[in-house]
Image (tube, rainbow, N blue to C red):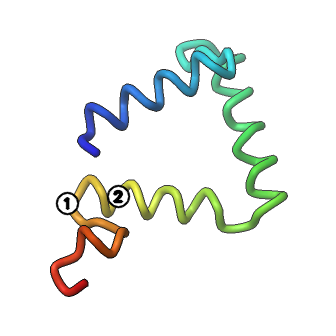
Amino acid sequence: MTPAQDTELADLMMQLVGLDLTSADGRAGAGSILREIEAKAPGTVARMQAGLALRRAGASLLAEGRPDA
């Protein structure tokens, strides 16, 4: 997935949950959702951030995307 596709998917997700990240209320709502996710499944947000960072760097977490698979 390209950075542009990541951005498009992030925009779609924000539309689906009804958050506007350009407003203080929207940012607070997004933060609240992330805290709830982290409370239910510790480490989830950090794993998502790490996966996105790897993907942006060109790495794939899928076996078929790795040369040694």
The amino acid type of the residue labelled 2 equals Ala
Residue 31: name its quadrant: top right
Left or right of 44? Residue 1 is left
The amino acid type of the residue labelled 1 equals Gly
Up/down of 61 relative to 23, above or below: below
Pinpoint residue 49: horizontal percent, then vertical percent.
48, 56
Q: Nearer the viewer, mark 2 or mark 1?
A: 1
Would you say the residues marked 2 and 1 are in contact, meaning their CB atoms lie under 8 Å apart?
no
Up/down of 12 relative to 32, above or below: above
The residue located at (77%, 63%) in the rendering is 41
Left or right of 19? Residue 65 is left
Residue 51: name its quadrant: bottom left
Give the quadrant of the C terminus. Answer: bottom left
Residue 52: name its quadrant: bottom left
Up/down of 6 relative to 37, above or below: above
Q: Nearer the viewer, residue 63 or 54?
A: 63
Within 10 Å of disc 1 (Cα), the crowding (few <14, some 14-19, many 20+) is: few
The residue located at (26%, 31%) in the rendering is 4
Give me the disc on residue 53: 2
Pinpoint residue 47: horizontal percent, then vertical percent.
54, 65
Left or right of 31? Residue 55 is left
The residue located at (74%, 57%) in the rendering is 38
Within 10 Å of disc 2 (Cα), the crowding (few <14, some 14-19, many 20+) is: few
Give me the disc on residue 58: 1
Instruction: Give the residue at the far left of this rendering.
Output: 67
Give the quadrant of the N terminus. Answer: top left
The residue located at (24%, 68%) in the rendering is 65
SS for tag 1?
Answer: loop
Pinpoint residue 67: horizontal percent, then vertical percent.
16, 79
Of pointers 2 and 1, the one earlier in the residue sequence: 2
SS for tag 2?
Answer: helix
Instruction: Give the residue at the far bottom of this rendering.
Output: 68
